[in-house]
Amino acid sequence: MIEFDYVTCLAVFPPPSFSPIPTGRQPRVAFGVPIRTSKLMLGVGRHMSWLPAVVGGLLAFLGCATAGSTSDAASQILRLDGEWSQAAQGRDVDRVVSFWADDATVFPPGRPPVVGKAAIREFVAKSFQTPGFSISWKTTGVVVSRSGDFAYGTGTNRVTFSGPDGREVTVEGKAVTVWRREPEGVWKCVIDIWNDVSPSSQ
């Protein structure tokens, strides 16, 4: 839903003030012939001079609405992303997979892309079966398109698992996600890619 910040918009782009249509003017004369201008003509001419201000005010309202809607979308995606990370820490496969779109693609580091929700579900389930596996992440920035249909997020993640010797291995990473607003208005991740920031540490 588009929300208008009326106070801000009106403060920056106040509506034009209208003055009464003048009456009682003496007819103008051209080539000795009096030219009579009706009140309607005077009103149209004077009102047409306000057209740029009216159009400018309308565009300002639309601009404020766009800014407000994209800001709201970014906040919503950040909230969803936080819930997504919590679900992953809780090892809830169904909940984790629900944040991806049906046609999503995951790009794990050093591995082929995982395409489609069924394949992603299998990928997540196998990851949770890895000894000592855990993953968490935090998206620090979200940019929403002007159309409000797509967005991308950037952030960091941390993956831990047990190495061959049983010792815990921690890998810090950087991540990018692409989100799409579905027809029902729900945001879903369609592209998920991350890479290692530093070599694995034990």
Image (tube, rainbow, N blue to C red):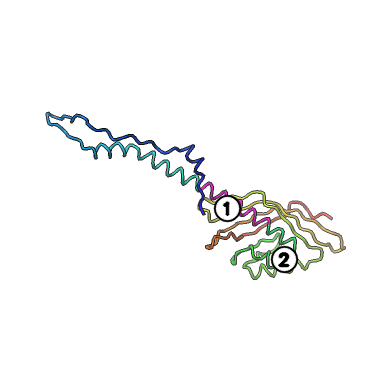
The residue labelled by disc 1 is 73
Badge 1: how crowded within 10 Å, few (<14), some, or many (20+)? many
Of all residues shown, which one is farthest toward the left?
Answer: 32
Residue 71 on image: x %, y %: 57, 48
Label located before the other in sequence (1 or 2): 1
Q: Is residue 3 magenta?
A: no
Residue at the spot 63% in from the left edge and 67% down from the top edge: 115
Type of amino acid at the residue the image marks with label 2:
Asp
Specify the principal SS of the magenta part. Answer: helix
Residue at the spot 59% in from the left edge and 57% down from the top edge: 179
Residue at the spot 45% in from the left edge and 38% down from the top edge: 13
Check the image and report above or below for 118 versus 40. Answer: below
The residue labelled by disc 2 is 92
Badge 2: how crowded within 10 Å, few (<14), some, or many (20+)? some
| Position of residue 2 in the picture relative to residue 28 (left or right) | right
Residue 132 on image: x %, y %: 81, 63
Residue 180 on image: x %, y %: 57, 59
Check the image and report above or below for 23 versus 67. Answer: above
Q: Helix or strand or loop: what does disc 1 sit on?
A: helix
| Front-lying residue, 138 or 48 | 48
Q: Helix or strand or loop: what does disc 2 sit on?
A: loop
Type of amino acid at the residue the image marks with label 1:
Ala
In the figure, residue 97 lies in which quadrant? bottom right
| Front-lying residue, 46 or 123 | 46
The Cα atoms of the two marked residues, 1 and 2, are separated by 25 Å
In the figure, residue 44 lies in which quadrant? top left
Region of the chain picked out in magenta, as a range: 66-82
